[in-house]
Amino acid sequence: MSQMKELPKGNRVIVSVIGPDKVGIINGVTSVLSSNGINILDISQTVMQEFLVMVLVGDMEGSKVDMATMKDLLHEKGREIGVRIDAQHEDVFNFMHRI
Amino acid sequence: MLSMQEILETIKMIQEENLDIRTITMGISIRDCCHPDPEVACRNIYDKITRLAGGLVEGGEDIAREYGIPIVNKRISVTPLALIAEASQADSYLPFARALDMAAREVGVNYIGGFSALVHKGFTRGDQKLIQAIPRALASTERVCSSVNVATTRAGINMDAVCQMGQVIKETARLTADQEGLGCTKLVVFANVPEDNPFMAGAFHGIGEPECVINVGVSGPGVVKSAVKRVEGEDFGTLAETIKKTAFKITRMGELVGRRAASRLGAPFGIVDISLAPTPAVGDSVADILEAMGLERCGTHGTTAALALLNDAVKKGGAMASSYVGGLSGAFIPVSEDMGMVRAVEDGALSMDKLEAMTCVCSVGLDMIAVPGDTSAETISAIIADEAAIGVANQKTTAVRIIPVPNKKVGDYVEYGVLLGRAPVIKVNPFSSNQFVRRGGRIPAPVQSLRN
């Protein structure tokens, strides 16, 4: 079973972006991540009906901000671009789908 | 590595299907707060609760942000107060209720459970004083919840307590008449009460529990309903399997949050309560799940079978997902807190009798049911006796949280707001049970073999 990590550092974050496809979404999201020192490990995207669905995995190891602050920054960016951006600790997904 | 589908499934559950952690409940032992001087005892209780639970609300909110999963309630349960207050020379236990209320307010939780007594075999003097204080305690405090255990499978049913609780419920309704009997929403009468239940209003910190513990209640009727809809027309094996897998995923969230909360708050992790707990929010309804299985309305013939299947599949999935499952762990069928149940009552599909039958196969019992204000104390006692008998005979928890709403009659509505919802007043049987409930004494414990 995956063990919970006690330290906030060394954790990965899953960023999800859902909204109408338009110019500048990837740039908007990645700029928030890179300016806060978060390395992007993986990007995957698909189009469901008319919506763009993008998932990024980021490494919080060198992050300048904590999870809560980063979430707020991403939410703000999402409002600016007109898409929904959420960030969750990877444990949420690991715990639900892996034993 | 996680797949895109898995990530999207989780996000959908949270964003669209109301998946949330219903409650993180900190259980606190106040056994070391006893003192002959009630004032000192109250101060001890207040100090201990505020010391241990000071970081509960903030910690819960931080975890919710970190994981992106809502944690709806942060609550506290304490040792049944009758056991603690008894050591003092107090004549009235009202100051204890006020101490709990003040502590809850100080740490910012909306409910604190444990104004409780365990009287399944008989009363001590402290139990009597506590039960007498319940109506005024609930009327004069905002956040205190009370529960009384009147029966167990091993002891039978204390009918003196059952009889008295009918009067206590009536009196509580009378004292909170200006709020449509709101006090009764904070009072639960139990049979076979669990000692680690995190859900209000019946939560208390049992006497076999540690100093301080974190228990978690999950939710997710909306998620289960969506899953059930996806297998429309499939056979029962597929249906049960689908619910099981969904319950597993929901419970994993509870396990994750519970462990994280426990390590953050420096208390051991107790249990995950895998109950399906509805809320008045649209789509967060147990009745909707039953209807998605193929019933036109919850309450029609087949409802008990559907609920039995649901309850069992949730337990099977949940038990696999968590190291420690406890509390009530079954589907809740409160009326006011479940819009599907309210609609079923309005359409004439769901009656008190059917609700009683449904409680035979799920937790917890007749919950949040509004009955006419002129319902007699004896009738309420008889309703409690019926539920207790179901619990005692089936070795399960049952409970009654019923509100005889002052000045309301069948067909009227009561409104309790966002948290507790609205309920239509339900008809009770008009024939008297007076002579039966007034006999007094105890109904003996049932034989445990000869199981028919």
Image: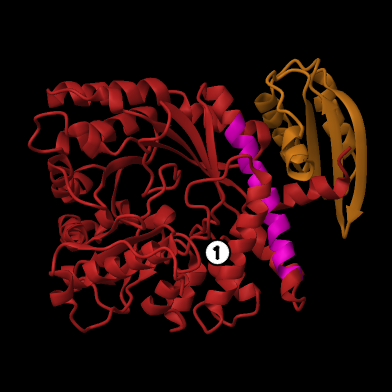
Question: Dot 1 lies on which element?
Answer: loop
- Image coloring type: by chain
Q: Position of residue B296 (x, y in %)?
A: 59, 83
* Residue position for label 1: B285
The question of residue B309 being in magenta is answered with no
* Residue B225 falls in image quadrant: bottom right
Q: Which residues are magenta?
A: B238-259
* Residue B98 falls in image quadrant: top left
Residue at 28% from the left image edge and 64% from the top image edge:
B403
Label 1 crowd bin: few (<14), some (14–19), many (20+), radius 10 Å:
many
Left or right of B355 on screen, residue B247: right
Q: Chain coloured red: which letter?
A: B
> In the depicted view, which residue is nearer to us: B228 or B72?
B228
Quadrant for the N terminus of chain B, please.
top right
Residue at 27% from the left image edge and 63% from the top image edge:
B444
Above or below, B160 against A29 in this view is: below
Q: Chain coloured orange: which letter?
A: A
